[in-house]
Amino acid sequence: MGNAESAVVQKRLTRFRPEERPVIDGVFNKLVSGGGGASEAPGKAITLQMLQSSMGSVTSDSLVRRVFHCLCSIDPELAAPAFGKTNQHPAPQVNREQLVIFLADALRGTAEERAPLILVMSQYPSGTAAAVTCEQVAQFVQDLISAVVQILINRGRLDGWTPEKMADSSVGVKVLAEHLCCELKPSDQGSCDVSCLEDWIFRTPQVSLYLEMLADEGLSISLSSSPPPKLLPPCRETPWNQLNSLLDIPTLMFLAPQVPDGYSAPWRLAFSTQVHGESFTRMMASLTRGGPSLLLIKDTKGHIFGGFASHTWELKPQFQGDSRCFLFSVFPTMRVYTATGYNEHFMYLNQHQQTMPNGLGMGGQHEYFGLWLDSDFGRGHSRARPKCTTYGSPQLSGDEDFTLDSMEVWHVGKPPKSEEDEEEEGKKSILFVDPEVQALMEMTGKTLHNPQVVECH
């Protein structure tokens, strides 16, 4: 960039590493060239058509227009969108300074700097007022999430997931957007100004992450020092040829960060009523091996909900588990309900008992679980008046006593060690285990490097 560029723009560029600055600087020329301009384009400007050509493959036309509207609104002297003003050019265009300011704030900005961008993109096409409604923000967030899903698909970052064999992502997009926007704290008049959005962005990190992906992937920047964020866990050992999963991509984006192993451990289908039939015994067998698991239930009213079990289930008439367990809903709302500390009734699994409840339960108490599935299979309940004591969850199902439509069990943690692995670990040398023996070995000039190797000097 030349010396004529504003000091504000030069300062924005310092947020990037030296090797990244030419990449950021080159985005303008790449956009103009893609629109039919020369490789070096002094005096040229970015048009809507140029932006559509670059971003159209991974974003909706609505979102491209939102971004262009935001770019046009940026005042280089303010280094931010100018509220109350519009681009007076008969065919709006974007100059180099406006683009660099947008990229710097979208990719490396603070919540304070990103809030004006989101405000302007949310109010498209109505202008550049100083506030927006929650509904306008929700519409923008839906566009943003849709773009992220499309990026994951188009860039081949599904890591084993098969969208065409999963639930409709358009539904998950709307529900995830509602979940993110429920954290908004509008004014008494119901509007959201820059300070409201700044607070929301600060408390809802997914918004910044998705905005970064939009700028980086939508404009094909791909900064070498910033590897693509991982939004989906790997999927393994899943018979997609037999399965139409209850999960969709936005629901995975919501659930994966809640699980202790996050994105590192693979998700493996352990049980599905569609694949394995409606059998409590078969489901129970999948739960009592395989480590941490996630239960996903759909009732006949269309509600989808479930629970996370932090370790392998045990068949016994006592409560089990720990405070890492949680309940959740994913339709019609996405929410997670973690342990309250009131009691330790995290998990319960029992069968063939005459004096104790037979079935699977999470939270609450006998006959009054936050989530219960009867051993007869096909029936359950979610009771909470007003909340489940263990997890603080409301009623998750459509009716308090529900009928099961379908169910899936996913193993979501590191697979438990096999008997062979445990036997191998049990063979550790006594030299490594017993401190007294270790001390004697060292006195004789022998060094222990690992449990099986003794080095003599």
Image (cartoon, rainbow, N blue to C red):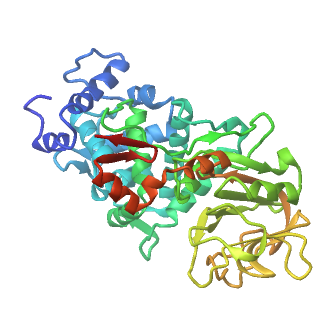
For the N terminus, give its image quadrant. top left
Q: Nearer the viewer, residue 321 or 371?
A: 321
Position of residue 149 measured from the top left corner of the image (x, y, whole percent): 55, 41
Position of residue 334 measured from the top left corner of the image (x, y, whole percent): 61, 62
Q: Nearer the viewer, residue 313 or 246?
A: 313
Seen at 27% across and 14% down, the residue is 38
Can residue 377 be seen?
yes
Q: How many marks?
A: 0
Q: Against 421, is 407 above or below?
A: below
Q: Nearer the viewer, residue 214 or 262?
A: 262
Position of residue 155 measured from the top left corner of the image (x, y, whole percent): 51, 30
Residue 224 image-quadrant placement: top left
Residue 384 horizontal side relative to residue 224, left or right:
right
Seen at 32% across and 66% down, the residue is 195
Position of residue 345 measured from the top left corner of the image (x, y, whole percent): 67, 78
Q: Against 275, is 200 above or below?
A: below
Seen at 16% across and 42% down, the residue is 14
Q: Against 27, is 434 above or below?
A: below
